[in-house]
Image (spheres, rainbow, N blue to C red):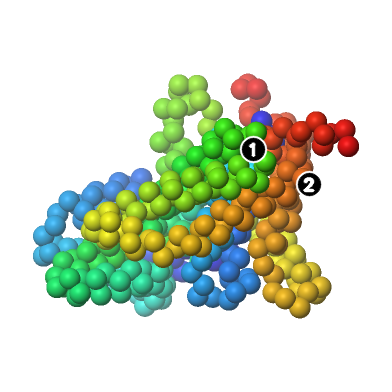
Amino acid sequence: MISLSSPVRTWAHGWRAGTKLAALCVATMLLFVIGNIGFQAAAFAFALLLYCLPGMVFLREGLGHLRVLIPFVVIVLIWHLVTGDPAGGIKTIMRMVTAVALANLVTMTTSLTALMDVVRWMSSPLRRLGVSTAPLEIVLPLLIRFVPVLTLRAGQMHQSWRARSLRRANYRIVLPMMLMALDDADRVGEALKARGGALPEQEN
Amino acid sequence: MEKDLARIALFAALIAILGLIPAITLGFGVPITAQSLGVMLAGAVLGSRQGGLAVLLFVFAAALGLPLLAGGRGGLGVFASPTVGFVVGFPVAAFVTGLVVEKLHRLPPGVNAGIGAFIGGIVVMYAFGTIGMAIVLNKSLTEAALLNSAFVLGDLLKAGLCGMLVAAIARLRPQMLPWYRAPVSHIFR
């Protein structure tokens, strides 16, 4: 599975995940509230600087994650050239790229466990109210485990399709994939129950 | 309880796999993915509550940084990009799809799923997607709707597919559709 996390360890890895998330919230809000083009340009340069600091490998990886924005950049540029407002277009593009770049920065430098800890901390008021958050801690690992398993099975189904047909696999392959996932879900559910259920003892 | 959780988790995984389909069958660079088909199916197969939760889990896991969205995207950057509206709208779309399917459970199982996928997976999804794009790209709602309209045809096809697939499930695994009551003629055949 491709990972979105950084290939190199940076100084930001040591920061608290909660602090990074809060800073990201404030930064994104400021980007959308302050329309001044000077501020937008400064923020854009700052984001670029942050990407350059950890070195070339990090910069290349980070820019790779931003490639998905290229079609939107092109569309907005063309749009604003046609309507005769290139400055507005540049501003919109800078704001979009900066916001996505900063958010990606947090994702790249924060581990899944650290983010889960933030989620657990934020959901603590719910637990105090008596709502169990244990199901979330069951389903997330299940999801993470079953993405590669189902990918493997889907690949096998695709191979068996190709072994039997001259035509390319089409949408019909979705039906066996869905049946497989639903059948597996029932077996996994039984296995979970046999191993003591999804909820801790005192909550059952 | 355990079975519900397992279904939610496995369907969320299935939606992620469906995002890979063009990469498997058509090669890279194909913009139409089966991921929104997965969202429609989640609502139509699991029903409003479980379907909505499955898609919510999927979006939550993507936000945590797992590359589950079509094209291996994920992370918090998705929520600042122009497609944020669609991603945020995914769980609502699945919920509404399920709601419509449950309300129309007297119709033939494929027909109600097709209608549900149209209302939830297209009307609701595009409402969210258009608002999100209008905010991020600083455009009016009409302009954003124009940009999005290129993808409507593909999604209409997917709504039809969703109906066909649900009809097949009703035939093969009727017990797996919580809203489905098989006609008596099916049971005493």
Mark 1 falls on what kind of element? Answer: loop
Q: Position of residue B61 (x, y in %)?
A: 51, 50
Q: Position of residue A160 (x, y in %)?
A: 79, 69
Which image quarter is the N terminus of chain B in? top right
Front residue of B182 and A64: B182
What residue is disc 2 on?
A: B172
Q: Is A118 placed above or below A101 here?
A: above
Residue type of the residue flagged with mark 1: Leu
Residue in the picture at 78% in, 46% down: B172
Residue in the picture at 74% in, 56% down: A176
Q: Is B129 placed above or below A122 here?
A: below
Q: Position of residue B136 (x, y in %)?
A: 28, 57
Q: Is residue A80 left or right of residue B7?
A: left
Closer to viewer: mark 2 or mark 1: 1
Front residue of A28 and B106: B106
What residue is disc 1 on?
A: B107
